[in-house]
Amino acid sequence: MIEHLNTEKRNEKTADLDQMSVLEILTVMNQEDETIPKAIAKELPAIEKMVKAVITAFEKGGRLFYIGAGTSGRLGILDAVECVPTFGTEPEMVQGLIAGGAKAIKDAVEGAEDSEELAVADLKAAQLTENDVVIGIAASGRTPYVIGGLDYAKNIGATTGSIACNAPAEISEHADIAIEVVSGAEILTGSTRLKAGTTQKLVLNMISTTAMIGIGKVYKNLMVDVRSTNIKLVRRAKNIIKDATGCDEATAERVFEESNHHVKTAIVMVLTNMSYEEATNSLVENKGFVRRTIAKD
């Protein structure tokens, strides 16, 4: 039964949604979206615990897995794939698993979310270990695929977390760390790609970004491990070198090339006058943190 879930309730403000003008619809959507940050704020202590657990896993060489079905699964995949260009991570470090596999990213796979066994198979295929973290995402808070994945992860000793948009959520009982953000009734009844989806995206932003900061992927507020894979990102990389060091354009161009297009190394080279080899070795010794590296120069 799902009728009792907040995400399935009818929103009294939009009982006549089909008779509203375009501007009225946009206005009520905007007003409903404004409630999301306040709802998330209530769960910041739980989100903090989740981030710290992810940082600990990364420091041990562990990985972060998001698991979910439908919109929840797609949002996990979106957050995971963006870590590669933004933070220079390997694709294996943060992964998103969706009920039904790759086909389910764009097409509905009937019944996949109702199978606990599929989640177990997916995590086994990923060779999950006790050093990893698994975060289950489900707007309803009751998806069997997520529950199956969390139970399997717990059984092998991995850290588990959950993100739900209802409280109390069933998946919370299967997680070490439970995040329950009650996003409330959708303007379009039951359409959890709306407020619930936005809620999940914001929480995922918090978890991955803060965890990456915690392992040295950021200097000041600059993404110093960005991968320069296109013209825009090459330009951004050079601008980051300039912003981080105060150097001129010519110097940024030169060290960008000398560092083999590795922004973090280039910054250390400028700030410490180290060679490429010295900067690379020093960053390794200081676990990739720019501040620690330049402080020990």
Image (spheres, rainbow, N blue to C red):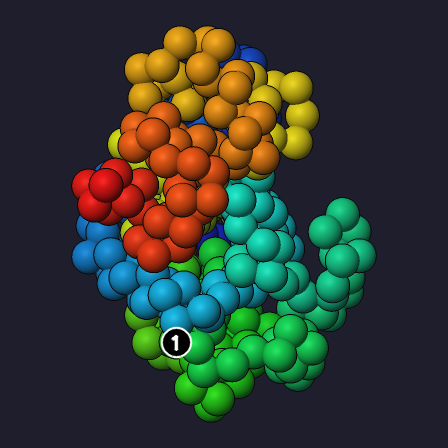
For badge 1, the amino acid type reads: Thr
Task: For label 1, count other residues whose C-alpha is less than 10 Å away and answer few (under 14), some (14-19) or many (20+).
Answer: many
Q: Position of residue 147 (x, y in %)?
A: 51, 77
Write down the residue under mark 1. Answer: 159
Q: Is residue 220 left or right of residue 76?
A: left
Q: Quadrant of residue 108?
A: bottom right
> Residue 28 or 195: which is nearer the viewer?
195
**Image position of 127 (left or right of 236):** right
Q: For this rendering, which residue is in front, 244 or 53?
A: 244
Q: In the image as oriented, which residue stretches furthest toward the top? A: 249
Q: Residue at x 48, y 56 (%)?
A: 139
Residue 105 x/y as whole percent: 72, 51
Would residue 60 be visible to someone looking at this image?
yes
Name which quarter of the figure residue 128 lies in: bottom right
Q: Image quarter for residue 35? A: top left
Residue placed most toward the observer, 137 or 260: 260
Q: Name the residue: 41% across, 64% down.
A: 58
Number of labels in the image equals 1
Residue plotted at (39% across, 71% down): 60
**Residue 223 visible, this orientation:** no
- Where, quadrant-wise, is the C terminus in this rendering? top left
Residue 181 picture location, percent across and down: 33, 53
Q: Is residue 262 above or below residue 109?
A: above
Q: Does residue 53 lie above or below 248 as drawn?
A: below
| In the image, farthest residue toward the bottom | 155
> Percent position (x, y) of residue 14?
45, 31
Local secondary structure at mark 1:
strand
